[in-house]
Amino acid sequence: MSPVADAKVIKQDKIAPGHFRLYLFAPEIAEAAKPGQFVHVRCGHTSDPLLRRPVSIHAVDREKGKVILFYRVAGKGTSLLSKNNRGDTISLLGPLGHGFSIPSRHARIFVVAGGIGIAPLYFFLQEIADSGTSADVFLGAATEKQLFFMNEIKESGHRVFPSTDDGSTGYHGTVTGLFEEYLRKSDNQSGPIRRGDDAKVYGCGPYGMLKRLTDIITTAGITGEVSLEERMGCGVGACLSCACKTRSGENGVQYRRACVEGPVFPAKEVVWE
């Protein structure tokens, strides 16, 4: 398949102030996409903005050729993207990057998402639900209105544990605080997590949240994967603007490109600074 596709806008929904769900007809990308991958989107039809914007693939409908993006307006590019309507055409490059590994059906799966970090994890949750696996999902946001897709995730068979910074619903505090408390309890519905269990954590969200999540799962002896939100220029590994520091061997360090070797990395390999 060609890595560049002109995708037709099917519809665009405003989910919350500044947050949009964009439905595109792009059958080749829908067929090839894996959870955790992204598309590089040309947001306008002129040279301004010059660079494409990386947007996580939020969901796909392979049968109908749909690719769905969930994004937050954060600048000129995404503001232009939000102006698109049904019938418009948007240039996509992708699917790009290295996504999440798909766990075995018998693994205990924990998903920890902060804010817009649910975007790629929603696709992951769809995929594992289709294969008969359910997860415990920890959703964090500033307030209740920013806990996106909670009911949809529940309807697909996962258990959801919300947290809000302002205490408007669920746990009052950070999503990592909620997850840490969950791990400490020995009476949670699925039983305690022990070092060496077939358990895995998948996370996406702000840098500080992922750093703290890595500390928690390292202490608990649980493996995990995190999706990094890095600024990208080319999206194909040429410009090196998304290079991030990772561990190599016992004491070595190397830089790897989030757009090619990531954006999903084993949590233990990321050098958090």
Image (spheres, rainbow, N blue to C red):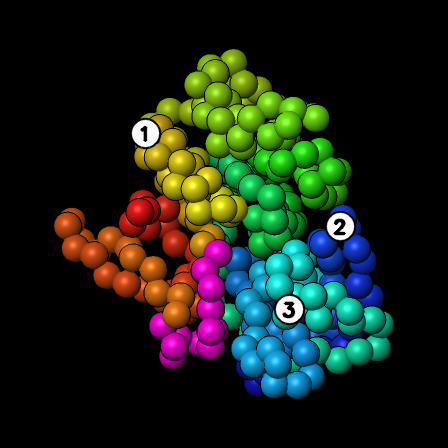
Q: Considering only vertical position in the picture, is 110 above or below 226?
A: above
Residue located beneath label 1 in the image? 219
Q: Which residue is farthest left?
A: 251
Residue located beneath label 3 in the image? 76
- Residue 86 can be seen, yes or no: yes
Q: CA distance from mark 2 to mark 1?
A: 38 Å
Q: Which mark is residue 17?
A: 2
What is the magenta segment's predominant secondary structure? loop
Residue 213 falls left or right of residue 66: left
User: The disc labelled 2 sits on which kind of residue?
Assistant: Pro
Q: Residues within 10 Å of mark 3 (few under 14, many from 20)?
A: few
Residue 154 falls left or right of residue 212: right
Residue 230: say if magenta. yes
Residue 233 falls left or right of residue 215: right
Looking at the picture, tell me which residue is in the foreground, 185 or 71.
Answer: 71
Looking at the picture, tell me which residue is in the foreground, 235 or 67.
Answer: 235
Q: CA distance from mark 3 to mark 2?
A: 16 Å
Q: Position of residue 182 (x, y in %)?
A: 50, 22
Tell me which segment is drawn in magenta. 229-240
